[in-house]
Each structure stands twice: as structure tokens, then as C-alpha cells.
Image (tube, rainbow, N blue to C red):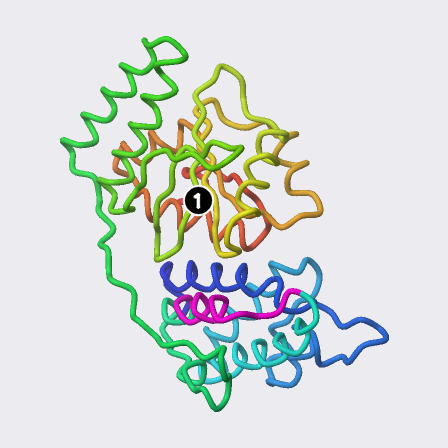
Amino acid sequence: MPLKIAKVQAVSALAQHLYEYLPGKPHPMADPRISFEGIAKSCGVTPYWSGGSKLPAITQLLSQTLEHQPKKFCGLILEVVRRAIVYRARKNPIVATDLATLHQLVYAAGFRLKDLEDTESFGELAVAFKPPSARPHLQLSATDRTRLRERLDDLAQMTPTMRGLAFETFLNELFALSGLTPRAPFQIIGEQIDGSFEAESQTYLLEAKWEGKKTGQAELLVFSGKISGKAQWTRGLFVSFAGFTDVGLEAFARGKATNLVCMDRFDIFFVLAGTGSLPDVLARKLRRAAEDNTAFVSAKALYV
């Protein structure tokens, strides 16, 4: 049976978290076991390792193992951790916060890695486990959808300066009504972040723009850089009311794993029409990004 959306999202998040743990393929002169390819072989799940682009390959390895051989899933993850601790010992070592995040992501996929809590196995890296508090994903009521659509109509009549701030407030309310625990805009030295929110226990930074022109590669790269400067499990949502240029999206995806997904005005209208909830739209966008490194696919296309 295909994985449910919640587990697909959890596996996608897990793949992104594990991305820097090990190389995808072994170096010709190095131990072939120190790679995702080598671990797939040693754990008996080689058919699920596709090779090629690293992030989609890791995502497929995890999702196919979970779907077809779930009893091997935890062993696969633990083997990645053990080998990564050795591989990264001299440079960018694995720390306890890495494993704490990993613990939560594996739990979201339906498992608990009790070995990570064992001090005899992992020493000072061992982490106590705390199940995340459940936050319901809410479908907007008909009244809320009507009111928010009216708010968008009002925004279109504002001056650009007023509209930008009002758009952030609008999104903050949309996320709150959808159960995504938004945080208001905040300032970090040298940069402005339009806000943040949580979905499936994952933190997203928000960039919101309402401009006459479509967003291109430069703006995507700047926001991606802000995300990369935070904790490695942080993601981003770029909301551009005008949309994104095809050339910019193509260039942004070339040769680099995306750490953000995108929404345009049609995605917002899709949610306000009640066709799909905002959390579910985000989950589907995240899955597509994990599968083919595409930051933007319209909500409508994701429900075909």
C-alpha cells in the first residue's frame, strides 16, 4: 500500500536532514561502505537505491524501504548515523542536536529509535526522546475563506508599501487559521525575515512578496542563503503573489538541492476555494520537491 501523505512528508524531511550525513556514492579511493549506496547494500535494500541525483535517491531509498521492508527502516537509519559519526568526526562532527532532530523525524514516520537514547551505544550523543505535541491541521471554514478573499481584494487597492505589510499580516492569519502556529516578522542582524511557522513539527521561514513582476532566480538564491544560515533542518516558503519566472526556477534548481518551496496567488486562491487545506498543499509541494528538486509546482497540478 502506498505511503500516506503524513509519512511521505516525514520521509521527505528525513531525507533532507540526512543529506549531509554521508556521500551518496563512495569515493573511488575510500571505504565503499561509507556512503548511502554502501549502506543500502549492507542493509539488504540495494534495489531501492537509484543513484543519480543525491536527494531524490535518498528519498527513494527511505520511502521504498519504509513501504516494502519496514522492519529494515530503523536499522537503515541507525547504520547511516553510525557511519556518519565516523565519517564526519574530523570535520563538521555529528552533535546531539542532530540526533534529537533525527529522533523527531523518525517518530513522525511512525518509529522510535530507542538506540539513540542508549548512552552505552552513543555516549554523549544519546538523546532523551520527547514526543512532539500534536497540533491539528485545520480546514478553513466557509466564513473564513470568504473573509480572507475579501481581504485580498482590499489589499489590491492599497499602495505598495501598505500592501506589503498587510500581505504579511494576511498570511499570518491564514497560517494561524490553518493550525500552522505562525510567528510575526522578526529581525536578524543584517537581514529581514518575514516570519516563520511550523508544519509537521518542522520550522519554515517565510518570505512574502506582492510585486508587479514575477520573482526570479536572484531573489530565490538570497532567501535560500538565509535558510542555509540557520539550523540545518530549517526550510523555507517563498510566497510571491505575482508568481515566479520559468527561467529563474530552472536556474535555481540546477545543481543544488532546494531547501524551500514556493506558492503564488493561484495557490492561495486554491486554498481559499476550499479545494485543499494549506497544510496538505504544503505537504504535496514538499513531496514533489523531494522527488525532483522542483521548488514550485502549482497546487492545482498537485491534485490532478
Q: Please, is residue 174 above or below residue 255 in the view?
A: above
Residue 164 lies in quadrant:
top left
Apparent side of residue 265 relative to residue 26 in the rendered image (left or right): left
Q: Amino acid at mark 1?
A: Leu
Q: Residue at x 21, y 39 (%)?
A: 140
Residue 264 lies in quadrant:
top left
Is-magenta flag for residue 151? no
Is-magenta flag for residue 99? yes
Assign a secondary structure to mark 1.
helix
Residue occupying the far right of the picture: 29
Residue occupying the far left of the picture: 143
Q: Please, is residue 228 above or below residue 149 in the view?
A: below
Q: Residue at x 40, y 13 (%)?
A: 161
| Observer-nearest of 11 and 163 | 163
Apparent side of residue 255 relative to residue 85 in the rendered image (left or right): right
Quarter of the image with the N terminus in it: bottom left
Position in image of residue 80 (x %, y %):
58, 76
- Crowding at dot 1, Cα within 10 Å, few <14 / some 14-19 / many 20+, comes out as few
Q: Please, is residue 103 above or below residue 115 in the view?
A: above
Q: Which residues are magenta?
A: 92-105
Q: Please, is residue 190 above or below residue 230 in the view?
A: above
Position in image of residue 60 (x %, y %):
56, 65
User: On the image, numbered disc 1 is attached to which residue?
Assistant: 302
| Observer-nearest of 304 and 214 | 214
Residue occupying the far bottom of the picture: 120
Apparent side of residue 143 relative to residue 53 in the rendered image (left or right): left
Q: Residue at x 84, y 73 (%)?
A: 28
Position in image of residue 214 (x %, y %):
54, 22
Position in image of residue 121 (x %, y %):
50, 88
